[in-house]
Image (tube, grey):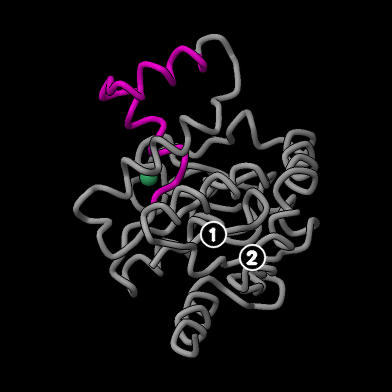
Amino acid sequence: MIIIMLGAPASGKGSVAEILTKELNIPAVSSGDIFRKHISEETEIGKKLKEYVTKGELVPDSIVLEMLEARLNEEDAKNGLILDGFVRTIPQAEALDKMLEARNQKIDLVVNLETSDEEILERVVNRRICKNCKAVYNTVLHPSAVKGKCDKCGGELYQRDDDTLERAKNRLEVYYKETAPLQEYYEKTGALYTTTLSVKINRMKDEVAHDVIEYLKTK
Ligand SMILES: [Zn+2]
């Protein structure tokens, strides 16, 4: 089974994917992780990636697909994969469908997470990360017991340079322009499942993941 996590940056895709991966026993891959892995292991794909990254150019879709196909061929992915952050544009979705079709596979489910812009921006600007163990906190929604200190390891909490209001707004804008049209694309293929993850209405990741699994049983 191949599942795509769709939703704005900081909509909670990774958190839901983490639960689904355990419940469904299929691995989750994020595009960032796989990029870093290829670069650090200096694979053939990694060498090509590095060139683009060094030049500050966008990685072409063909390389993204090549990485994905290599990942699908790994032993632990024989029952499928959960893709987080891979498909960002319609041309990528079309190319992915083609590649899967040739392998006799398809996108079975697209989990589309909806959260208000207001809540997403709040999540981003209040996000704090432990310098030591990388645990993630939120100064409003999920604060550490002692301000500025990690509950788990006592490490110092910091804010990423990227987590400013202005940058978060930019990322949202790119999402609406390039990625949100995928909702309609996957609606047409019948794979779309839209749900809400929101702290404000107390609908948290466990409940969302539970509903996704129940929905899968009806498919
Ligand atoms: Zn820590």
Instruction: Give the residue type that dot 1 points to.
Output: Met
Q: Which residue is mark 2?
A: 113
The quadrant where residue 196 appears: bottom right
Residue corresponding to mark 1: 5
Q: What's the residue at 62%, 45% (across, down)?
A: 88
| Label 2 environment density (alpha carbons within 10 Å; few <14, some 14–19, many ≥20) | many
Q: Nearer the viewer, residue 125 or 34?
A: 34
Image spot of residue 52 (x, y percent): 51, 16
**Residue 140 at x, y percent in the picture:** 66, 57
Does residue 30 sit above or below 41 in this rendering? below
Q: Is the residue under label 2 in contact with that under label 1 (CB below 8 Å)?
A: yes
- Taking 18 as reference, is 193 left or right? right
Q: Is residue 211 magenta?
A: no
Q: Is residue 169 above or below residue 20?
A: above
Position of residue 40 measured from the top left corner of the image (x, y, whole percent): 30, 23
Query: Which of disc 2 and disc 1 is earlier in sequence?
Result: 1
In percent of the image, x 64 and y 78: which residue is there? 202
